[in-house]
Image: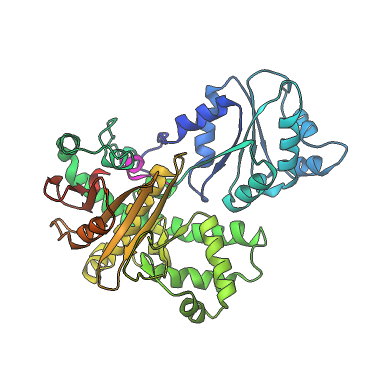
Amino acid sequence: MSIITTGYIDREVAQLLNNTLNEGKIVVLLGPRQSGKTTLIKHILPQHKLVGYLTFDDLKLRQIIGDPNMGLKAAISRSIDINLDSPNLIIVLDECQKCPQVFEQVKLLYDSDGPKPRFLLTGSSSLELHSKSAESLAGRVRCLFLSPFSFSEYRNANSIPTEEGYKYIDHIVNQNLTEETGKEIFYKISKSKEIRMKLLDEMLIFGSFPECALYSDKSEKIKFLANFRNSYIEKDILDLSLIDDWKPYNHLLELLAEYNASTFIIKDMAKQAGISDKTLKKYLNILQKTLLAKLLPVYTKNIKRRLAKSPKLHFCDMGFVSHLTESFDLATLRSSGAIGKRLESFVFAEFLKASQNDWRPHSFSFWRTNSGYEIDLIYSLENALIPMEIKYSTEKPKLKSLMAFAEEQKGIKFKCVLYRGDYEYDKTTNTHFIPIWGL
């Protein structure tokens, strides 16, 4: 077994997490299994003077919380030698999904008069954490998301640091990309083009779960992904009794992976999976709430042509898709054309990571007409639309779909083609051709 690096890889959400803790709200850190939540917390906590850490892996703690004569205060007092009235105290409660009673008790302590600690809640089941915190802690909680490595973090893990301001995705999300900025970024990153393209292909095959990303040996990556699937089914699905029988859900994962970055009809998929429409919808909801995939809706506002109504499915980590489809060979994916679907989901996941902790109203969709026009990804931010076409090619594609969308949706600020070529700007169409390896 060989690891690329044993040092801590800086996470983009770290500063926001620190700032939010300092604001005094209850913080819930959400993220899929193996996204690096525990590593991040252990890195941040030493920066604070007074920290208490409790994990509900400890059965005795769960029993204390459940005892009406004891509860959270008693659990904290028995576990850490810190006065609860101490200013700037942070209490970390880990594996909270194993102790559902704790959410209501955190609320009572938070609402009490006088000095009180700040709370950071986390755990391995984002589904349970999200629902319980929303029910019990409404108005008191700030949810932050930690995804697997972004492309920027992945490069950092491979000793290709991203200099501040020199990545395209931030400028696209903030809608301030200009020709001058685009050229400046390209000049800065072009020296590492080859290694960036290599790392991009690696992410399209093995994904970006931190532990998997840090293995340099292919067999270790494949083993990690198999173990991830088993622990996901066992810990996030069966332990929480979300379903009675894991086999249909497990089978559905494999079917859906074949439809990655594609549309499907609910009724047809349910029939193929051998389950009811209702069960399929339930399973899709679980898959999304465990943050492993997203259904992308069709963009419909002010559309005159009849649009396809089926959603498009995107898995959020391509390594998981590789495991589910048993497709780890880049040459085969290229020759079959499947690599283009991988790239489309990869780009969607990158924009999802870049915007998931953004308070501004935003959404994602795609666009397709009966006449054959299609936009792979539309990023809507505060009612502004950014249409994007995504191509696994170094050649610039034609812009028919982008132009058709822009013609129908007046006021488009700029359009993007994300591909593997170099940066260019087309003044006539106001289109940025952006290298994906520069995201």
Q: Please, what is the dominant secondary structure of the magenta stretch?
A: helix
Residue drawn at 29 percent across, 55 percent down: 409
Q: Which image quarter: residue 89? A: top right
Measuring from the top left, give residue 215's x and y in whole percent. 38, 48
Q: In this view of the protein, can residue 2 be seen by the observer?
A: no
Position of 40 relative to 304 (above/below) = above
Q: Quadrant of residue 242?
A: bottom right
Depth order, front residue of 281/68? 281
Q: Residue 199: x percent and y percent? A: 27, 48
Q: Nearer the viewer, residue 346 or 114?
A: 114
Q: How is the image coloured?
A: rainbow
- Relative side of 330 to 43, left or right: left
Q: Which residues are magenta?
A: 148-155
| Residue 306 part of the magenta-drawn span | no
Q: Residue at x 38, y 63 (%)?
A: 322
Q: Residue at x 57, y 78 (%)?
A: 276
* Above or below: residue 184 compared with residue 371: above
Residue 51 place in picture, x, y as percent: 63, 25
* Left or right: where 305 falls relative to 84: left
What residue is at 27 percent from the left and 31 percent from the top?
A: 163
Queried whether the magenta region covers residue 154, the answer comes back as: yes
User: Residue 210, how many percent across, how many down?
Assistant: 42, 45
Q: Report whether residue 244 is seen.
A: yes
Q: Quadrant of the C terminus?
A: top left
